[in-house]
Amino acid sequence: MPTLDLNRLMIEATQMTRSGDLQGAMAAIQSAMRGAGVAAGTGTGCEPARNGGGYASDAGEVIDVEMRDISDSTRHEPIRRDVPRSAPDQARPTVDSGFTVGHYADGGTRRDYKLYIPPAAGTRPLPLIVMLHGCTQDPDDFAAGTQMNEAGQTQDFFVLYPAQSRRANPQGCWNWFKHNHQVRGRGEPALLAGMTRQIMAKHIIDPERVYIAGLSAGGAMAAIMGEAYPDLYAAVGIHSGLASGAAADLPSALAAMKGGGTGLRGSASGVPTIVFHGDADATVHHGNGQQVISAAVGTGTTVKPERIGGGDQRAHTRHVHRAADGLVIAEYWLVHGAPHAWSGGSRLGSYTDERGPDATQEMVRFFFEHPRQPKN
């Protein structure tokens, strides 16, 4: 299909959605994606295919457009893990560790979350990692797949999993591609920053060691958060995502996912960033990974690529970016043969690739090497 026809169909879909013709809009979206060579069921909305094959919904249903609110049918009861409690501290009360449920509200908008509280909570200021799930996922699924709670238990840090509402996006995607959710103080970035600050106020968190990471649509939103709130997040981890500013609407989102965004910001954010991306990713082209790095650190860095691995683990190339003073400011892990899934994740969760290098451990290592430098 010629590019002009693809753009025309996407424009028609947007117009039909705004007029309330959701069925017609969906048909137009699916037609556009078929013309672009995207097969239904393979995942397109910055979302991976489930382990063992495609997922049930049609491809066009995964990228949300401006749809009407629907009832939120994905509530989960809190899960309590069998994690030992920390020893009481004379100066502070003992804090129950485990996986707890909560919510954050700002005006008439609310988001639920799950919070992992490590055994050492309450004894000293600890780091916090915010984890943004991908489309169709939820905090429980994302925690199981990434095993970030297990890392928090052994390395003493909190893990916050915001839950996207199905009212805000029927597929549970963070709305990274909508212009009103891409800047500081508005939309979902404001909600996520407010939720982060609420957790920091309730618990003893080290403000210089607060980080954010995400997968797919969550990775794209993590990139936005790092650029919008460098005073809050010390470093960013992006897995199979896109750079901040890669898209501003549905047609540009599809184009960015296929080959890379064109509306990127003019200057680098300077936020330390680690990126994981598979070069066999059929959902978000791996060229977006390099764009994430460029958006974070620009071009004035020295890069040392190193190819590692093979055998039981996927081979991968690690690109280490250093500033003029020699400090590492970014890492780009290109995992060879890997699909659109969390590298080194557990089969207990969806959208994971067990054969890859351990993205969870590498992100945690990178984060702890990059505390935010307090201003004088």
Image: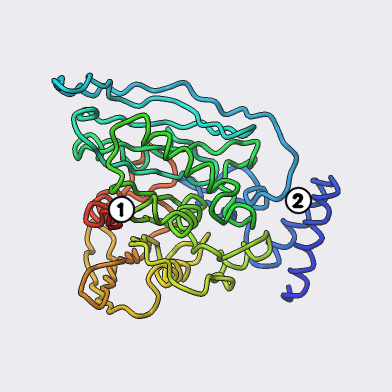
Q: Quadrant of the N terminus?
A: bottom right
Residue at the spot 81% in from the left edge and 50% down from the top edge: 18
Q: Residues within 10 Å of mark 2 (few under 14, many from 20)?
A: many
Q: Nearer the viewer, residue 114 or 134?
A: 114
Q: Position of residue 60 (x, y in %)?
A: 67, 52
Q: Position of residue 270 (x, y in %)?
A: 37, 67
Q: Amino acid at mark 1?
A: Ala
Q: Nearer the viewer, residue 325 or 155?
A: 325
Pointers 1 and 2 in contact (CB under 8 A)? no
Q: Nearer the viewer, residue 233 or 23?
A: 233
Q: Quadrant of the C terminus?
A: bottom left
Report the colour scheme.
rainbow
Q: Nearer the viewer, residue 206 or 62?
A: 206
Q: Quadrant of residue 373?
A: bottom left
Q: Residues within 10 Å of mark 1 (few under 14, many from 20)?
A: many
93 shown above or below 119: above
Q: Quadrant of residue 56?
A: top right
Say whether residue 24 is left or right of residue 162. Answer: right
Q: Position of residue 14 (x, y in %)?
A: 78, 56
Label at residue 26? 2
Element type at mark 2: helix
Q: Amino acid at mark 2?
A: Met
- Residue under numbered circle 1: 359
Mark with earlier residue (1, 2): 2
270 shown above or below 169: below
**Of circles 1 and 2, which is in front?**
1
Label at residue 345? none
